[in-house]
Image (cartoon, helix red, strand yellow):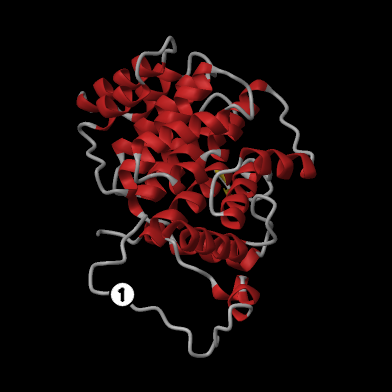
Amino acid sequence: MRYSPVSRFRGTFLGAFLGGSLAPAGIQSQNYPDLGRMAILGTESLISLGRLDLDDWIARQQQESLHLAAADDISIKIIIATLPVALFFHENPIKLRQNLLRVLKIWEDDPVVRDGTLAVAYAIALALTEKLNPLTLIPQTIAFLGETPTSIPKKLLKVQNLLEQGTGLSKAQAEFAREEKLSNTIAMAFYCFLSTLEDFRLAVLRATHDGNSTFVRQATGAITGALSGAYNGIGSIPVNWQVSLLQSNSPVWGLTSFSQMLELTDAFVAVWSGVYDIALNPKELTDKGCDMALLSVYAAPRVIRSR
């Protein structure tokens, strides 16, 4: 495996945060601080229950009284909110699609949001399973979407044509900047990701360069960062950017700090992988007469596998 699941999970979350926070002057962690708050709540739910529970997701959001303002604001937040589902079910395309569609029912029933969510999640799933081929990603993604009345498949095909022609950033931006639509944001994010596949820094800088508005830059940056972070892992994210977040000790998507985001991601990976955290449930074992100090787990070689 090229990169560990921990590295890719961390890369996805941190990539989305940095991509949505990056401005020409540097990292601005206070910009749209709640952009990924719903993703954090969803992650905490999956960690707590070990499964997808829509009622728990809804209860957590209602408890924090999260408000979604403009239509575009809703769309990008929903896509970022589904990142935990994309990561948790990335191994199985059928379960991935089923659970994404279940989660989307929490919010508005918008076909464009649905297709955008499925496209981003599927690309992340391919990256995590190391099956992402830049030459076939877009056709595979369109096949995953299936028949749809939205323009996203057509926009993605246009991205593929631009990449094949070696079209530069400014021309690509001009192609997708005529209207501030979610479909254009998705297309531009795929372009920035695929045109700089191995370079996280360059991908998000290109995604946040120029654009019609600050929100469009942040939305494109967040999706590009998630895609590139999943593909390249956290090691691809510039160290000075990570150090800046550590030193600033600023809130991250409602969490107290960058360190807390990393801890949450590690706990998420543990739950996904099936690791049992004894520290979280010590009473369950002691009630059964287990000696915590002597507790061990044994298995024959190659028996323990991922879910």
Q: In this picture, is 34 found above or below 289?
A: above
Q: In this picture, is 168 found above or below 290?
A: above
Q: Position of residue 193 (x, y in %)?
A: 36, 38
Element under disc 1: loop
Instruction: Confirm whether residue 127 shows in the render.
Output: yes
> Which residue is tagged 1?
299
Q: In this picture, is 36 found above or below 103?
A: below
- Which quarter of the rendering shows the N terminus? bottom left
Query: Residue at 25% of width from left, 74% of height from top?
Result: 300
Q: Amino acid at mark 1?
A: Ala
Q: Position of residue 207 (x, y in %)?
A: 45, 36
Asked where in the image residue 191 lies, by quadrant, the reply is top left
- Return the residue found at the far front: 288
Q: In this picture, is 234 found above or below 76?
A: below
Left or right of 214? Residue 204 is left
Query: Residue at 54% of width from left, 31% of height from top?
Result: 102
- Return the residue found at the far bottom: 293
Q: Position of residue 79 (x, y in %)?
A: 53, 34
Query: Residue at 66% of width from left, 65% of height from top?
Result: 249
Q: How many marks?
A: 1
Instruction: Confirm whether residue 159 shows in the render.
Output: no
Q: Position of residue 299 (x, y in %)?
A: 31, 75
Query: Residue at 58% of width from left, 59% of height from top?
Result: 261
Asked where in the image residue 194 lies, by quadrant, the reply is top left
Q: Residues within 10 Å of mark 1 (few under 14, many from 20)?
A: few
- Which quarter of the rendering shows the C terminus? bottom left
